[in-house]
Image: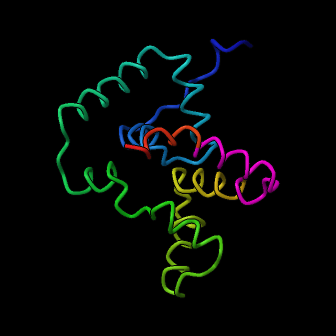
């Protein structure tokens, strides 16, 4: 029996909003994306949610999620990697990354980890490119 005999999973508005916020697990995100490819109705539902957001959902919770107010800064994530934060901050970031599984912060953390592992010669080249691209600006 082909795909026509298979029933598409249904998703709540909350799940689709979480998809837009990158707040779903990798598996859940893959399920939503698969369903979106196959369902005009689901794509319409997602567009409706996006339109409502664009009009401005102004609840405290919506603003909190959009502005990522519970997410650490990139500098804090770097300090987390170096384990130089006080124990309360370190514990909070453990919770935020491991229990909540914030996709945004996990991606930032993975990027920082990759930068930590790059060879010194590559780091030097990157720094030189940054300096050369801004050297003209420094004269002014």
**Numbered label tally:** 0
Q: Which residues are magenta?
A: 115-131
2 to 135, vertically: above or below: above
Estimate the x, y position of residue 1 in percent, counting from the top left: 74, 13
Q: Left of 64 or right of it: where is 39? A: right
Looking at the picture, tell me which residue is in the foreground, 15 or 96: 96
For the rendered model, the colour scheme is: rainbow
Estimate the x, y position of residue 39 in percent, counting from the top left: 49, 17
- Does 126 appear in magenta? yes
- Determine the residue positioned at 58% across, 42% down: 28
Q: Left of 62 or right of it: where is 82? A: right
Quarter assignment of residue 112? bottom right
- Does 116 appear in magenta? yes
Quarter assignment of residue 57? top left
Which quarter of the rendering shows the C terminus?
top left
Q: Left of 67 or right of it: where is 131? A: right
- Determine the residue positioned at 56% across, 28% down: 33
Looking at the picture, tell me which residue is in the foreground, 69 or 130: 130
Estimate the x, y position of residue 24 in percent, counting from the top left: 52, 47
Q: Left of 122 or right of it: where is 62? A: left
37 to 109, vertically: above or below: above
Estimate the x, y position of residue 26 in percent, counting from the top left: 63, 44
6 to 81, vertically: above or below: above
- Determine the residue positioned at 55% across, 16% down: 38
């Amino acid at each position: 029996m082909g795909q026509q005999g298979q029933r598409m999973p249904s998703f709540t508005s909350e799940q689709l909003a979480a998809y837009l916020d990158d707040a779903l697990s990798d598996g859940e995100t893959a399920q939503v994306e698969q369903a979106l490819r196959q369902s005009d109705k689901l794509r319409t539902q997602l567009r409706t949610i996006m339109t409502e957001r664009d009009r401005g959902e102004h609840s405290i919770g919506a603003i909190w999620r959009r502005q990522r107010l519970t997410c650490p800064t990139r500098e804090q994530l770097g300090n987390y990697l170096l384990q130089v934060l006080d124990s309360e901050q370190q514990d909070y970031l453990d919770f935020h990354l491991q229990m909540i599984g914030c996709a945004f912060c996990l991606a930032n953390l993975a990027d920082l980890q990759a930068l930590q592992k790059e060879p010194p010669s590559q780091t030097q080249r990157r720094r030189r490119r940054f300096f050369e691209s801004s050297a003209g600006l420094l004269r002014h």
